[in-house]
Image (spheres, helix red, strand yellow):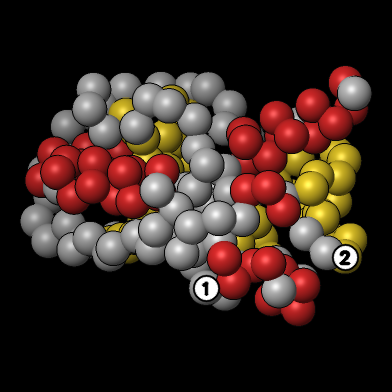
């Protein structure tokens, strides 16, 4: 599971094969934002108080977040980060859509059919992406077939903690459609 911390009903995740710049995802009920690890830039929609907690937590754990970002880039298991223990109140909120996977179906081997909340759908071949300690077990078709959608990050995940960023998966769907 890609969630590296939970506090106050908020789930924090870093996704494998996600786009630059370094960032993490925070979900709170139906709300989701991405937060730049280095610059704190927020994209998405979140209640002000919850976003304040997320930003305070990020300030406290910036080095750990950057280390986990590098672990994800190297396709290594991510390390949990302690939850927020004490929080303050300061308003901040931005609005922009965040892409999510709404349906997934294994097609055999290392292929998936996917549907996204923006209406895109199609199949992808993930075999070339299955290197590194986190992804190696997915080369086994029986393990690969255990794919699911994480309820917090709304992307594909496997029981061993492997995941792929929705934007990366959508880019593969787009490439296949263009071919």
Observer able to see residue 100: no
Taking the image as shown, residue 102 lies to the left or right of residue 18, namely right
Q: Residues within 10 Å of mark 1 (few under 14, many from 20)?
A: some
Instruction: Work out whether residue 139 or residue 111 is closer to the camera in this orientation and state it.
Output: 139
Which residue does the image show at 23% across and 47% down from the upper left?
67
Where's residue 170, x and y in %? 71, 34
Where's residue 27, x and y in %? 45, 49
Instruction: Work out whether residue 123 or residue 104 is closer to the camera in this orientation and state it.
Output: 123
Which residue does the image show at 44% across and 36% down from the upper left?
33
Give the residue pinned by disc 2: 108
Which residue does the image show at 64% across and 67% down from the upper left?
138
Instruction: Work out whether residue 127 or residue 103 is closer to the camera in this orientation and state it.
Output: 127
Where's residue 54, x and y in %? 26, 44
Give the residue pinned by disc 1: 160
Query: What's the CA distance linking mark 1 and mark 2?
Result: 19 Å
Taking the image as shown, residue 106 lies to the left or right of residue 63, namely right
Q: Quadrant of residue 48?
A: top left
Q: Quadrant of the C terminus?
A: top right
């Amino acid at each position: 599971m890609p969630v590296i911390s939970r506090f106050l009903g908020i789930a924090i995740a870093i996704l494998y094969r996600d786009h630059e710049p370094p960032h993490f995802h925070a979900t709170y009920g139906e709300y989701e934002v991405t937060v730049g690890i280095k610059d704190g830039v927020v994209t998405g929609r979140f209640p002000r108080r919850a976003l304040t907690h997320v930003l305070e937590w990020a300030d406290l754990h910036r080095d750990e977040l950057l280390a986990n970002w590098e672990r994800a880039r190297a396709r290594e298991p991510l390390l949990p980060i302690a939850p927020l223990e004490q929080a303050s109140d300061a308003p901040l909120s931005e609005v922009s859509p965040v892409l999510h996977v709404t349906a997934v179906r294994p097609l055999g081997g290392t292929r998936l059919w996917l549907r996204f909340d923006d209406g895109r759908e199609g199949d992808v071949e993930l075999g070339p992406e299955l290197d590194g300690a986190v992804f190696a077990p997915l080369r086994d078709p029986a393990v690969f077939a255990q794919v699911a959608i994480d309820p917090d990050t709304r992307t594909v995940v496997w029981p061993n903690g492997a995941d792929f960023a929705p934007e990366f998966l959508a880019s593969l769907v787009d490439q296949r459609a263009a071919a």
